Amino acid sequence: MNKRGLKIVKSENFGDFTSYSGYHFQTIIDKYPQSNLADDAAYALIYIITDDVYNFDDAKIERKKLLQFMKTYPKSNLINTATNRVKAIDYDIKHGVSTIMD
């Protein structure tokens, strides 16, 4: 990873591409964990591809990350957004909708 937080990600589905690693968001969380930006940074990290290889990903992984976010930042201004997304994922799973992030 370079200082700009970019890296090459190998993808069988889409071909190799450049992805942002979330470096700056993680820096905010690490250096300023009590700031009013830490929860925003943590939420953004949920949706950043952090693996070196990217394939289709199950929504259950997103759900797990959202629940951890809600536990870590219960007073976040993004709690409603996270809660609604978890509800949508639960609905899709219950009704057999194929919720695959790509």
Image: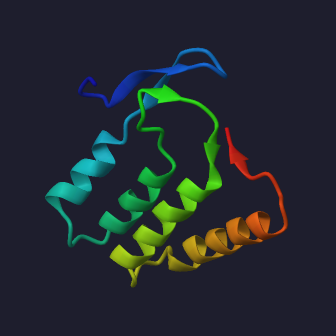
Q: Nearer the viewer, residue 31 or 94?
A: 94
Residue drawn 32% across the image and 50% down it: 25
Q: Is residue 35 above or below residue 60?
A: below
Residue farthest to the bottom?
75
Where residue 81 sits in the image (x, y, percent)? Answer: 59, 72
Pick the quarter of the image with the N terminus: top left
Q: Is residue 102 left or right of residue 6?
A: right
Q: Is residue 71 above or below residue 38?
A: below
Q: Is residue 96 above or below residue 72?
A: above
Q: Is residue 97 left or right of residue 43?
A: right
Q: Is residue 47 above or below residue 2?
A: below
Residue farthest to the top?
15
Image quadrant where residue 92 sits: bottom right
Where residue 55 sits in the image (x, y, percent)? Answer: 59, 31
Colour option used? rainbow
Q: How many marks?
A: 0
Residue drawn 36% across the image and 67% down it: 39
Image quadrant where residue 34 sits: bottom left
Where residue 72 sits in the image (x, y, percent)? Answer: 34, 74
Q: Is residue 73 left or right of residue 89?
A: left
Pick the quarter of the image with the C terminus: top right
Q: Is residue 30 left or right of residue 91?
A: left
Where residue 50 sits in the image (x, y, percent)? Answer: 41, 38
Residue drawn 41% across the image and 27% down it: 52
- Asked if residue 48 shows in the view, the reply is yes
- Asked if residue 73 shows in the view, the reply is no
Image quadrant where residue 56 sits: top right
Residue drawn 42% across the image and 69% down it: 69
